[in-house]
Amino acid sequence: MDKIESIAERIRVSFEKRTQARDRALAQTRTLIRHCSHAIRAIHRDEQDTASENIKQAKELVSLLQTELSLFGDLYHAGYTQDALKEFAEASILYSLVLFDQLPDPESLNVGEATYLQGLAEVAGELRRRCLDNLRHGNTHEAEKLLDYMDEIYAILITMDYPDAITGGLRRLTDIVRGVTERTRGDLTISLRQYQLEQRLSELEQHLVNPA
């Protein structure tokens, strides 16, 4: 037992370092989530510069987290860290799809594959929101394009038939994406039919006013 104090001291030093790393990570993940939320809001408002700046700052925080937690794998893979990275994946994917019609890959975002797919699944809800905004403004072409994106996302997610322990509960998110996509398809169909009806009524009115 003569070594117990030296052993305990080493453990205390290790725990102290781990606690400090955890505290920093918690603060960084909160800031990361805030930047992602601001980016998504800016995307919906078509504020490209604001969205870009928040995505940039979020990406810097992702790199910082990876560096500071490189010696603490359990903290990096903890729920609060991965949830923040999922938010980053969601914001980055939405940003690239809406503004550039491009899809970033997990490597370019520096996130794990399961986290990437979870973020991709979350994007469907934001695409629905943007789709409805376009419908309200009569931009049916853009709304149809966004619905196509949602269909493609679901088509990929449905093929990821692996245990939840591997995918991080992706099956539940996939079911949500299916529901969101079908509701959006119904909303778009109703909107298009209403538009077609209005066009026909307008043509009929013109014909009655100015008969051939």
Image (cartoon, rainbow, N blue to C red):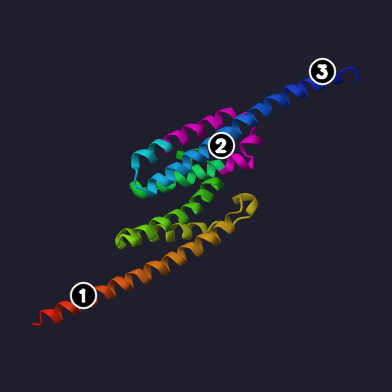
Q: Residues within 10 Å of mark 1 (few under 14, many from 20)?
A: few
Question: Quadrant location of the N terminus?
Answer: top right
Could you tell me which residue is drawn at 32 percent across and 73 percent down?
194
Residue type at tag 1? Ser
158 shown above or below 72:
below
Could you tell me which residue is drawn at 77 percent across and 24 percent down?
11
Residue type at tag 2? Thr
23 shown above or below 187:
above
Nearer the observer, 160 or 123: 123
**x and y percentages locating residue 41 in the rendered image:** 42, 46
Is residue 105 at all visible to an observer of this figure? no
Nearer the observer, 173 or 30: 30
Q: Which residue is mark 2?
A: 29
Nearer the observer, 205 or 92: 205
Q: Secondary structure at mark 1?
A: helix
Q: What label sits on residue 193 in the rendered view?
A: none
**x and y percentages locating residue 36 in the rendered image:** 47, 42
Is the C-beta separation of discs 3 and 2 under 8 Å? Answer: no
Report the predominant secondary structure element of the magenta stretch.
helix
Residue type at tag 3? Ser
Give the magenta-colored segment's residue range: 55-83
Q: Which residue is mark 1?
A: 202
Sequence-wise, the earlier of marks 2 and 1 is: 2
Q: Which residue is mark 3?
A: 6
Give the foreground label among 3 and 2. Answer: 2
**x and y percentages locating residue 150 in the rendered image:** 43, 59
Q: Secondary structure at mark 3?
A: helix
Give the foreground label among 2 and 1. Answer: 1
